[in-house]
Image (cartoon, grey):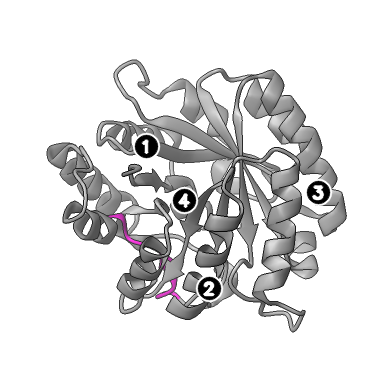
Amino acid sequence: MSEIKLVECPRDAMQGWEEFIPTGQKIRYLNSLLKIGFHTLDFGSFVSPKAIPQLRDTEEVLAGLELSSTKTKLLAIVANVRGAEQALNHDEISFLGFPFSVSEEFQKRNTNSTIEESLMRVEEIQKLCIKKNKDLVIYISMGFGNPYGEPWNAEIVIKWVRRLSAMGIKIIALSDTVGVSNPVNISSLFTQLIPEVKEVEFGAHLHSNPLTWLEKVEAAYQSGCKRFDSALKGIGGCPMANDDLVGNLATENLVSYFKGIQDLKLQDAAFRDSLAIAAEIFH
């Protein structure tokens, strides 16, 4: 049985936080998360400080991380080639994440480019990643629905996944940007994509409220998904959801669910420490 991969996303938790989190606090929190045993830590982003002021200190934070005794790999988000080049200057980073939206409107808002322009960026970033022996992770934004009145259906998502796969992308996470995923559309997409596009590892970046997380996780897992993004305490999510209750999946919920299925090899004491630090930072 292939292992369940947990991707902890403090970057997603922090990026929309209104008060600037001091660099030292970020480093302390991330170092505590690195001790737990997650597969990947989505720790920061190389994007315009104007766009995401909270993460303007990503390079300083990276310099303070204790990586010698962790197996957890680092992922950084980029939105263009310049950001990718910055990220690739750091050997410590294993994965670059790029938000690719199947909504034209959201792609313009999020990365200031059209879908076709973004596809060209993906192609260029993928070439840079191959040269540096890094993996590019594509997040399919608006993967489960569209709030802008544009057409959305599973076929549109599948079409773009095929194009990305043809470019050599090996990891694609379907992202529920505005909290509209449900067991039906989650199952529909994963049961179609996983058997058809075998060369791609599919992940789920789901947003939920505290009442709907379980049905969403079950739908994804039972449809063959083994890679899940989450954040401690469920903090973060998309500001456009306009709903404080629709945040990231809470890591503690995911862990409690998967513990009955597989030994996740997580360090319980480190997990408790990180929860305590998260309570200090995000209050």
Within 10 angstroms of label 2, few (less than 14), some, or many (20 or more) residues?
A: some
Residue displayed at 74% across by 34% down:
125
Q: In the rendered image, which quarter contains the N terminus?
A: top left
- Please tell me which residue lies in front, 49 or 3: 3
Q: Locate residue 264: give its quadrant.
A: top left
- Please tell me which residue lies in front, 147 or 12: 147
**Amino acid bearing label 3:** Leu
In space, the residues marked 1 and 4 are separated at their CA atoms by 20 Å
In space, the residues marked 4 and 3 are separated at their CA atoms by 27 Å
Secondary structure beneath label 1:
loop
Residue linked to disc 1: 39
Of mark 2 and mark 4, the one earlier in the sequence is: 4
**Amino acid bearing label 1:** His
Q: Tell whether position 149 is magenta.
A: no
Q: How many labels does the image show?
A: 4
Residue linked to disc 4: 14
Whether label 1 touches label 4, CB < 8 Å? no
Judged left or right of residue 135, residue 156 is right
Of mark 2 and mark 1, the one earlier in the sequence is: 1
Judged left or right of residue 81, residue 221 is left
Q: Locate residue 13: give its quadrant.
A: bottom left
Secondary structure beneath label 2:
helix
Residue linked to disc 3: 119
Residue displayed at 61% across by 66% down:
143
Q: Most prominent secondary structure in the magenta stretch?
A: loop
In space, the residues marked 2 and 1 are separated at their CA atoms by 26 Å
Within 10 angstroms of label 3, few (less than 14), some, or many (20 or more) residues?
A: some
Whether label 2 touches label 3, CB < 8 Å? no
Percent across and percent down for residue 226 are 39, 51
Mark number displayed over residue 188: 2
Whether label 3 touches label 1, CB < 8 Å? no
